[in-house]
Image (cartoon, rainbow, N blue to C red):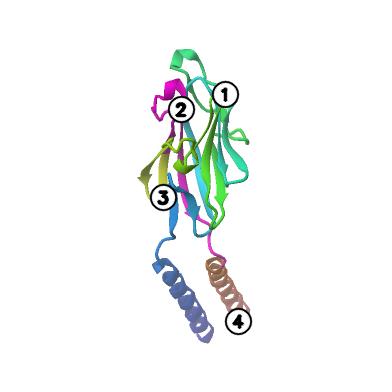
Amino acid sequence: MINFTKTAAVIGLVAGSSLGLAAIPAQAFSFGNDGIQFDKDTLVDFGFISSQGLFKSTLSVFDGTTSTVLFAETKAFDTSLTDFKGSCPKTVSSPSGNCENSFLFKSGVNYSLLLDSTPNGKVYSTTSLNNPATLQAIFTETGANSYLIAFDDRGNRNDVDFNDFKVTAEFKSVPEPTALAGLGLVAGTIALSSRRKKNQA
C-alpha cells in the first residue's frame, strides 16, 4: 500500500508537470513571406502536389548560406498533352525517391524556400530575398499548423499564376527533453512497482 501511494504521488507530480507544459502558450513562429523561423527545433513534413510549366525546377530549404533539396524534377513535365504538368514520381521526387520529405528547422534560424527553375532563375518564398522584391509564393493555411504553398516562377512573361510548383507543409515541435524525461519516469516507476509486487507475491 505504501509503494502504491509513492507511485501514485510520483505519477501525479509528473502528470501535473505535463499539464503545466500543456498550459504554456504555443510556440511563436513565422511561416510565410517574411521568412520561416521557429523558437524551438521544429520538424516540418512536406508533400509534393504538382508542378506546371516549361522549366525544370528544384525546391530547397535555404538558411541564408546553404540549400537542402526537398523535391527535384528529373524533367520539366510529364507530357505536353497535360498542359506541361509535372507529377510524382513521373517527373518530381525527393532525394529519397518519395513524394514526401521532411526538414528539421533549427531554433532561431530564419529560413526561406527556394525554387530554382532552369533556365529561368531563382525565386524565394521570402519576398525580401527576391530581386525585385516581389511576392513569388502564396502561403494558404489549411488547418492547424498545415499550409499549402504555391509558387510562381516568373515564367511565361511573368504570368503570376502561382501554379508552377505546389507543396503542402505540416509541422509539429520536437518533444522537449524534460517532457521525454517525465514520460520515462512514469514508465520506470510503474515497472518498478510491478516488479516489487511480483517479488512480494
* Residue at the (50%, 81%) spot, across then down: 4
Along the polypeptide, which appears first: circle 4 or circle 3? 3
**Gap between marks 3 and 2 measured at Cα:** 28 Å
| Dot 4 crowding, Cα within 10 Å, few <14, some 14–19, many 20+ | few
Q: Give the SS element for disc 3.
A: loop
Which residue in the protein does label 4 denote?
Answer: 200
Along the polypeptide, which appears first: circle 1 or circle 3? 1
Which residue in the protein does label 2 denote?
Answer: 154
| Dot 3 crowding, Cα within 10 Å, few <14, some 14–19, many 20+ | few
Along the polypeptide, which appears first: circle 4 or circle 1? 1
Residue contact at pointers 4 and 1, CB within 8 angstroms: no
Examine the structure image and report whether residue 195 is included in the region drawn in magenta.
no
Q: Position of residue 88 (x, y in %)?
A: 52, 28
- The answer to which quarter of the image holds residue 93 is top right
Q: Position of residue 29 (x, y in %)?
A: 44, 55
Q: Position of residue 195 (x, y in %)?
A: 61, 75
Kind of residue indicated by mark 4:
Gln
Along the polypeptide, which appears first: circle 1 or circle 2? 1
Which residue in the protein does label 3 denote?
Answer: 145
Residue contact at pointers 4 and 3, CB within 8 angstroms: no
**Gap between marks 4 and 2 measured at Cα:** 75 Å
**Gap between marks 1 and 3 measured at Cα:** 34 Å
Residue contact at pointers 1 and 2, CB within 8 angstroms: no
**Gap between marks 1 and 2 measured at Cα:** 11 Å
**Gap between marks 4 and 3 measured at Cα:** 50 Å
2, above or below 184, in the image: below
53, above or below 182, in the image: above
Which residue in the protein does label 1 denote?
Answer: 119
Report the span colored magenta: 149-177
Q: Position of residue 191 (x, y in %)?
A: 58, 71
